[in-house]
Amino acid sequence: MTSYVTEPTRETPVLGEWEVVVLGGGPAGLAAATAAARAGRSTLLVEKGGYLGGAGTGGGLSTFCGMYSNVHGEHVLTVRGHATELLERIDRLGGLRAPHLSFADRIQAQAYDIPAYRSAADEHVLAAGAQLLYHAFAVGAITGPSGIEAVVVESKSGRGILRGQVFIDSSGDGDLMAWSGTGHEKADPYGDMLFPSTMFRINAVDDERAGPAWKTLPRLMDEAVAAGRPRFPRRGAIVRPQRDAIEWRANATQLRNPDGSAVDGTDVWQLTHGEVQGRAQAQEVFGFIRENHPGFERSYIVDIGPEIGIRETRRLLGRYVLTEDDVRSCARFEDSIGLNGWPVEAHVDGDLDIRWPYGDDPVGYNQLPYRVLVPSEGPGNLLVAGRCASMTHGGQSAARVAGPCFAMGQAAGTAAHLALKARSTVAEVDTGELRAELEEEGACLTL
């Protein structure tokens, strides 16, 4: 039974007021803040860490998935606009590798250098005119008759209030929507929640001798288990070279609680367990790679992601809920605000299940409707973008990756501007005007 302590009443300082307040600096958040600021809105981007990028930096991911679509066999960059400008900034810092094929060579992904991404993201958001607040951990919301009035944060400076007119929840876990009483659901960790991972990077690899290790390593792992070795945290391992081929990234862990359930990213005790378990799994899997695969004999772990990579927790109940069938049937929507070409990537117990679009020659992408960002009921000044947007478990298993999150974020920031311009709720935004604004800024809404 939980016991409670009543804290004394106190006055909390107001740290400022902005037209748009964005919570969470992952792909959706940084795109949202950039879009709102470029439209001329005073904008604050609040991030709990000391850098932007979300799982792509703090989680050590180092790959943008979902930027490309396989359109009738042709690999096409389908997430554009502010996201491609960010790629150009990373490239100018020497941090991009040529896109590579993943998942049986059926889809392209974009590897990058994490420090370059961090620096480029700072430049990208600040050049738009947005303000950054790092090391501020959001802990609550203040609501009133007009909707959300402020976000409450804790930092080294103490507790503070951030007032705003329109709020964008791109926290990943949907923290702001939960605190404000906005309708949402949470994945069931016993079979309906994607398992988290801990990413790590390997240095001093002999690239020529390693060859296409991402193809041969899973077979070696299966053979070892068949010969009696205890099973690995996850069947197979995704290993790929970075910009300099002596350094490889590895995605080979899967984090679970002692009862087998997925680690819940909204539970601090489970997060702690996951961090410890993830580092142990990284060492275990790397030891096998080094001892059994050519080219890795002199290699070592150069970095383990400073945070575990959470894939799924809370999801908005929005005006439309994107489903797995929408993804696999390449659905079209009149209020499209971007595209997703990534397949359903289900991190199931001990394995990875990839589910592709239906048919022999699919168009290869689904559109993302504006309605997945808009609560079906709740505050009229809240938009939700990123992996916590309105999607089923299956739909979210595809559209949670960086590419569609960039697209959702740019749309959310632009919609916030239009709601302020029209003095309307976010649900009343003219989607025709929104789409026109996005296309003018280079976004791809259809092909």
Image (spheres, helix red, strand yellow):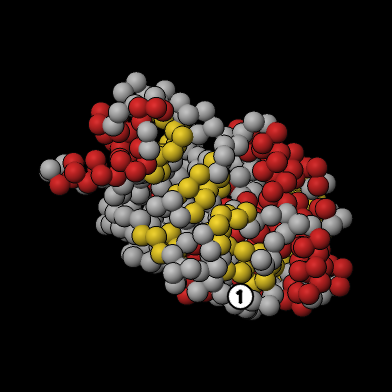
Give the left or right position of residue 110, taking residue 393 as reference.
right
Residue 377: x %, y % from top left: 64, 79
Residue drawn at x 73%, y 46% as measured from the top left: 85
Front residue of this view, candidates 49 and 85? 85
Residue drawn at x 15%, y 47% as measured from the top left: 226
* Residue at the disc numbered 1: 332
**In the picture, residue 427 is in which quadrant?**
bottom right
State whether residue 247 appears in this view: yes
Residue 347: x %, y % from top left: 38, 57
Residue drawn at x 64%, y 76% as measured from the top left: 333
Give the left or right position of residue 152, taking residue 305 as reference.
right
- Could you tell me which quadrant the C terminus lies in? bottom right
Residue 164: x %, y % from top left: 78, 60
Front residue of this view, candidates 122 and 377? 122
Q: Secondary structure at mark 1?
A: loop
Q: Where 374 sits versus 352, above or below?
A: below
Q: Residues within 10 Å of mark 1 (few under 14, many from 20)?
A: some
How many numbered circles are shown? 1
- Could you tell me which quadrant the N terminus lies in? bottom left
Give the left or right position of residue 93, taking residue 108 as reference.
right
Residue 368: x %, y % from top left: 62, 69
Q: Where 403 sits versus 391, above or below?
A: above
**In the picture, residue 237 is in which quadrant?**
top left
Give the left or right position of residue 84, taking residue 101 as reference.
right
Q: Amino acid at mark 1?
A: Arg
